[in-house]
Amino acid sequence: MRPTIEAMAEGDVEAIARLRIEAFFEGAGRTLGEDVAGLRGLIAGDGFEAAFVARDRGRPIGSCLLVRNEIDSPHDLAPWLAGLVVAEDHRGDGVGKALVGTVEAHAASAGIGKLYLYTWQARGFYEALGWSAIETFEQDGAPMLLMSRDLGHFTVSRKR
């Protein structure tokens, strides 16, 4: 399957927020309304931060973000690849890889040389995409991994 990946639009926000709540925030107290508001703020922002959505036949099936600040980060680093989520019935189809590649290319085109991310369980997935583990630590009683990706491998063509 080859998903269509585009900048997130208003019509995608609620569906993606539902995926995000289920994947990241269930039992954490974050409401659907809070996540919808956060995504709306991100797509209406200054253009540095970005949200991308993957679609299958027009239906949102995943998302990934480029953000300045990661939620409750114990590290003073920026910017971050964050919030990679893919609908369960589309996992293993290359959607996550395509979304990560889109965020990396967008960041490189904005002149960003390095990205960071946190993961709990997806170390192997990100390492296969060229990300490197930096530090394992504990946050809120759970193991966490800080990873980075040098974006120097991207060739960015610029119009003169």
Image (cartoon, rainbow, N blue to C red):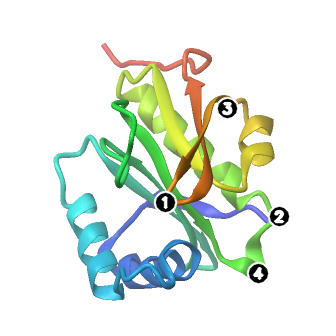
Total of numbered circles in the picture? 4
Residue 153 vertical position relative to residue 126 in the rendered view, above or below: above
Distance, label 1 to label 2, CA atoms, is: 29 Å
Quarter of the view holding residue 32: bottom left
Q: Which mark is residue 92?
A: 2
Label 1 element class: loop
Amino acid at pointer 3: Trp
Distance, label 4 to label 3, CA atoms, is: 25 Å
Distance, label 1 to label 4, CA atoms, is: 30 Å
Give the position of the N terminus as an image quadrant. bottom right
Residue 78 vertical position relative to residue 111 in the rendered view, above or below: below
Give the position of the C terminus as an image quadrant. top left
Label 4 belongs to which residue? 89
Q: Residue at x 49, y 85 (%)?
A: 27
Mark toward the viewer: 3 or 1: 1
Mark toward the viewer: 1 or 4: 1
Amino acid at pointer 2: Gly
Label 3 belongs to which residue? 131
| Label 4 CA crowd tier, 10 Å (few <14, some 14–19, many 20+) | few
The answer to which of 144 and 116 lies nearer the viewer is: 144
Distance, label 3 to label 2, CA atoms, is: 18 Å
Tell me which label, 4 or 3, sits earlier in the chain: 4
